[in-house]
Image (cartoon, grey):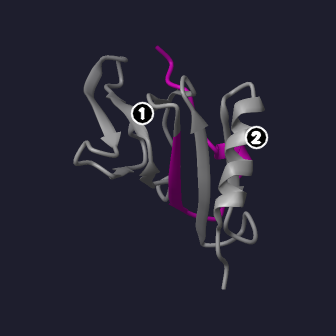
């Protein structure tokens, strides 16, 4: 059994605050070879994940927003915003799932946010994410 307590989350937020990207993660799986990859991601306000997509057929991605709010954008292959929405606390949207190939970006809107990300493994850093060629 594994429990994540407030002290661990506070530490994760402090790491995020000190990070250039304003985010930090805690792996919940044992290995990059695990069939299911699980991680907590702490974000601070202004943290922005650039538009990207996952090229491999098994690279769907789902996250549950536990705390805070995020702006999520979905883009066309040409770089136009198809959909933009706020997800998280008090928005009515707490779970977001992307299919392989969905070009998306994420930005933390609140002072901090906490996400639980789940995706299929194994994880290969060479194919972690691809940038669109706009």
| Residue beneath the point at 64% across and 60% down | 6
Q: Nearer the viewer, residue 84 or 75?
A: 84
Q: Residue 28: x, y in percent? A: 67, 66
Residue holding disc 1 = 104
Q: Residue 91: x, y in percent? A: 25, 42
Q: Quadrant of residue 22?
A: top right
Q: Nearer the viewer, residue 24 or 134?
A: 24
* Quadrant of the image containing the N terminus: bottom right
Determine the CA span between mark 2 and mark 1: 25 Å
Residue holding disc 2 = 15
Q: Is residue 127 magenta?
A: yes
Q: Quick one: label 2 or label 1, which is nearer the N terminus?
A: 2
| Residue beneath the point at 27% across and 48% down | 93
Q: Secondary structure at mark 2?
A: helix
Nearer mark to the viewer, of 2 and 1 = 2
Q: Quadrant of residue 130?
A: top right
In the rendered view, would you say 101 is above or below 47? below
Segment tinted magenta in the rendering: 113-134
Q: Is residue 55 visible?
A: no
Q: Residue furthest top?
A: 134
Q: Nearer the viewer, residue 19 or 79?
A: 19
Q: Along the horizontal axis of the image, is 87 left or right of 129?
A: left
Question: How many neighbours does mark 1 have within 10 angstroms: few (below 14), some (14-19), or many (20 or more)?
Answer: many
């Amino acid at each position: 059994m594994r429990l994540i307590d407030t002290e661990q989350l506070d530490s994760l937020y402090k790491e995020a605050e000190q990070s250039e990207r304003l985010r930090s993660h805690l792996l919940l799986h044992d290995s990059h070879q695990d069939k299911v990859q699980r991680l907590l991601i702490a974000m601070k306000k202004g943290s922005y994940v650039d538009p990207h997509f996952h090229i491999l057929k098994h690279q769907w991605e789902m996250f549950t927003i536990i705390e805070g709010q995020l702006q999520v954008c979905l883009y066309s292959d040409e770089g136009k915003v198809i959909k933009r929405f706020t997800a998280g606390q008090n928005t009515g949207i707490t779970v977001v799932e992307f299919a392989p190939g969905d070009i998306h970006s994420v930005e933390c809107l609140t002072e901090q946010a906490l996400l639980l990300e789940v995706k299929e493994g194994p994880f290969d850093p060479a194919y972690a994410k691809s940038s669109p060629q706009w």
